[in-house]
Amino acid sequence: MQEAIIKLKLLGQMPDSIEDDPTGETIDNYDKLLSNVKIPLTKEEAEVLINIFPKSGMYGVEWVLLKLVESYFIEAPSYDEYRKLITACPSKEWRETMQVRLDNWEKKNKQ
C-alpha cells in the first residue's frame, strides 16, 4: 500500500468544513497526501480512500479525493464491484454523487 494512503488512513475521515471547521494545517495535510497518491489504485487502496470522505465538504480537497476514487473504476473488475465500493462511503452526499456520476456514465456509454 502506498505510504500516502497509509498516512491518510491514520488521519481518518476528513473533517467537515462546516461542522468541524478544520485548521489550515489539517487541510494542507490532506491535500499534500492526496497529491502524492499514484494511480492506478489497488482495491485495498480504494477502500481506504472511500472511507475518508468528509460528511459534505472540506474546502475543495474532497474533489481530489473523488477523482482518485473514480480512477479505480477503470481498474475495477466490474461495475458491481465499483458500485459496492461506492456504498461503503460514509458520506451520504458523496455516495449519492458517485452513484449519479456512474449512472450517467453508464447511460452515455450504452447508446
Image: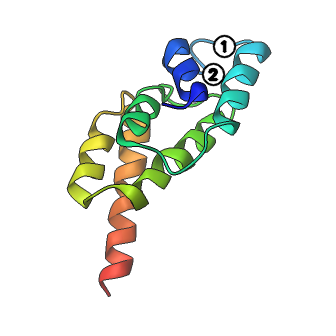
Q: Is residue 6 left or right of residue 108?
A: right
Along the viewing direction, whichever of 21 and 41 lies nearer the viewer: 41
The residue that disc 2 covers is 17
- Three-letter residue code for mark 2: Ser
Determine whether label 2 and label 1 are within 8 Å by CB: yes
In the rendered view, would you say 64 is above or below 99? above
Dot label at residue 21: 1
Classed neighbour count for the residue bearing mark 1: other residues with Cα under 10 Å, few (<14), some (14–19), many (≥20): few
| Secondary structure beneath label 1 | loop
- Evaluate whether residue 14 shows in this view: no
Residue 103 is situated, as x and y percent measured from the top left of the image, at 32, 63
Q: Residue at x 38, y 78 (%)?
A: 108
Farthest residue to the left: give it: 80
In the rendered view, would you say 33 is above or below 87? above
In the rendered view, would you say 14 is above or below 110? above
Residue 53 is situated, as x and y percent measured from the top left of the image, at 48, 30
Along the viewing direction, whichever of 21 and 37 lies nearer the viewer: 37
Residue 84: quadrant of the picture: top left
Q: Residue at x 74, y 12 (%)?
A: 23
Dot label at residue 96: none
The colour scheme is: rainbow
- Three-letter residue code for mark 1: Asp
In the rendered view, would you say 90 is above or below 74? above
Along the viewing direction, whichever of 61 and 48 lies nearer the viewer: 48
| Secondary structure beneath label 2 | loop
Residue 68 is situated, as x and y percent measured from the top left of the image, at 54, 46
